[in-house]
Image (cartoon, grey):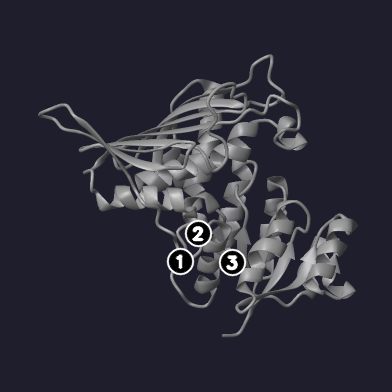
Amino acid sequence: MKKKRCLMIGAGGMARGWIRNFYPNFADRHEIVALVDIAPKPLNEQGDFLGLPQNARYTDLEKAFAETEADYCTIVTPPWAHRQCAQLACAHHLHILMEKPIADTWEDVVAIYRAVKKAGIKCTVMQNYRYNPTMYTFREVLRSQRLGQLNYLMGRFAADYRTYAAWGAFRHEIPHSLLVEGGVHHLDMLRNLTGSRCVQISGWEWNRPWSSFKGESNANYVMKMANGVVAHYEGTCSGTGHQNSWHREYYRAVCEKGEVVIDSDNILRLVMRDNTTGALTTEEVPLIQPPFQGHNYVIDAHLKWLAGGPKPETVLEDNMQSNATMFAAIEASAKSKVVDVAAMVKKAAGRR
């Protein structure tokens, strides 16, 4: 199989992890042929690691697109830069694999969506948390309907970031810090586990005087899903007690015949109550190990799609639903109202 040629946009921070930890696992199917970053130091560090010649290292984004022959681009930049990168990819008809969120404003999300659709290119958004063994298994338990149909779902994220820069200094400076940098993962996970899309959302994001954040660092929301399931999201960056930080979030799905629960110990449990005797039984569920995990799962799915395989689950049009939920949450809090997420997506897609 001919290797897919990639224009890599971003070299520092998370992009470094892509270059050194994820993409080497796909060396038989993929190669980075050019690299872009506005900062010379990470550009040259990763350029050296990749063995790229100087003329394949760019600080000018437009020049990189104009001069590089590639099949697709990977966008691992701050969210506010995604729109320019994606629109240039569309103009040069390069497929896209990008980090979440799609963008940092709903206006930019819609612009990217419409540009991709007009260009007719393939675009996948990274949602790696879906494909860790714990959450992959959680979802499979629900899909099996071993406990019957899903009634409602709870999700909790709690991390102690009371010290400034504990979560990276820039996150302590930006507005909507929890939702934009964290909640986009968790709201997507609630969609993933319910197997549906959010049609309405209500609740609030807020900050408190003792917070180390300038933007909103707490959130509580209720989501109504298209399939009738109700989901609740609780998040805080000032977790002063029991921690449910990254990869150790709490989820509880209440079903017809019992509950599926996972907590910070990362043990998946079924809890069932006998309706006659009242006795409770708890069963630990062995974790399924998907063939690829996290970022690698989505990269594999994207490369297969480029080679003519099926669409990944986190294609742009699906991930729009998660981004819409996030921006609707921001609006719900600002206006203290229930926001119609379905109407937002419908309008963005140009449907009446």
Q: Judge left or right: residue 157 versus residue 231.
A: right
Res. 191 in view: yes
How would you rate the neighbour count of disc 1 (Cα within 10 Å): few for under 14, some for 14-19, many for 20 or more? some
Q: On the image, numbered disc 3 is attached to which residue?
A: 119
**119 and 271: which one is in front?**
271
Residue at 52% from the left image edge and 26% from the top image edge? 242
Residue at 51% from the left image edge and 73% from the top image edge? 304
Q: Amino acid at mark 3?
A: Ala
Mark 2 or mark 3: which is in front?
2
Q: Judge left or right: residue 236 versus residue 199.
A: right
Q: Residue furthest top?
A: 209
- Locate residue 117, reporting x and y percent: 54, 61
Report the Cα–Cα distance between label 1 and label 3: 17 Å
Q: On the image, numbered disc 1 is attached to which residue?
A: 311
Res. 90 in view: no
Q: Amino acid at mark 1?
A: Lys
